[in-house]
Image (cartoon, rainbow, N blue to C red):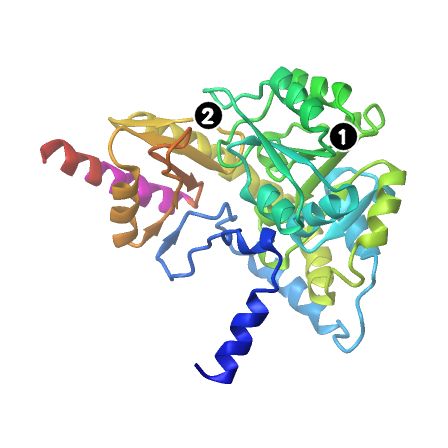
Amino acid sequence: MSPKSTTTKSISRLVQPAVRKLTAYHIVEEPVRVKLDAMENPFPLPPDVRRDVAEAIERTLINRYPDPSAKELKKAIADFWGLDAERMILGNGSDELIQAVVLAFGGPVLIPVPTFAMYEITSRALSQAVATVPLRKDFSLDADLLIKKAKQVKAKVIFLACPNNPTGNRFADDAVRKVLESVNAAVVIDEAYFDFSGKSFLPFLDRHPNMIVLRTLSKIGLAGLRVGMLAAAPEVIEELNKIRLPYNINVLSQAAGIAVLKHRETLKAQISLLISERGRLYNALSRLQGITPFPSETNFILFRTNGSATRIFTMLKQQGILIKNLDRPGPLRNCLRVTVGAPEENNEFIGQMQGILATDSHG
């Protein structure tokens, strides 16, 4: 064995056990013709918006550090969503903000399952204990079970995705409020898909000082900029700012984000079209024999197949269509998740599904 490989092996042994036990968050990097796996907005920016972005970037001084607080971008986001800029911080995607919350509060971390994988991955990477409670069969939240578990494990942080990924449903307001009022923990309400549900817990921030709300620009067409937002009580913002990395939002993301958010009507029109397409896609899936779609308040639809979900996933991929394969033992057995795409993408997906299922019925 060469000295180099010996050194590499010995260094890897120094990695914390909690990290060595993890499985990396899997992202398919193969090029495909129709990409419906990652909850992205399928529409490119119109020419007038691209021109504004290009002009903003041309004025950007990339030899200088960015505004550490991203004040102008924060104001643009506050205006877009009708929020208070003084009660928010921004992150390099919601992922960085999830990490900051776990760093600040520690564990145990409590999550309902199934839910967004990064809550558990991030917590375990930071060597924090993770406890889970199952959602009901219809993927609704059992508030009493969650509260009981929170008290049992003395949870410091609870993550609730509203609406939830990968199930697509939004937990009942009463259930979430019951959790907020009954636990001694930071309750993070992840509203990544707020724009597709139109419902938010942010108006109740003053009533629940233990609540933290996350949102992101990724789902509305700016995934490449990596900009997430966290809103919380001023004293929580003050503590999180102590561990937020300096200059965490780069100058290009700040400039481009400000430029795009000025085109509010363009973004709102795209969101409205995706909501309409979500309904059309859900109805089309409902008509397919052997397919059961779940109601969604997001920009994706989870559906269960009577046959092998993995086989359908593979056959779609062979036709150049990529969706998310969630087929595993447990509540997501034989489940797939499809992002709502542009109308022509949705048409092709449904057409290919019809062909695959017709082949199965004649096979």
Q: Is residue 123 left or right of residue 343?
A: right
Query: Viewed as shown, does residue 51 lie left or right of 332?
Result: right
Amino acid type, mark 2: Pro
Q: Secondary structure at mark 1?
A: loop
Please say if the residues under marks 2 and 1 sit with CB atoms less than 8 Å apart.
no
Q: Is residue 309 left or right of residue 196?
A: left
Residue occupied by mark 1:
185
Q: Quadrant of the N terminus?
A: bottom left
Q: Is residue 136 left or right of residue 54?
A: left
Residue 119 quadrant: top right
Q: Which one is closest to the eye, mark 2 or mark 1?
A: 1
Q: Residues within 10 Å of mark 1 (few under 14, many from 20)?
A: many
Badge number at residue 299: none
Q: Residue 199, located in which quarter of the rendered image?
A: top right
Q: Residue furthest left?
A: 363
For the point 37% across and 47% down, the residue is 345
- Which residue matches tag 2? 295
Stretch of the chain drawn in magenta:
343-355
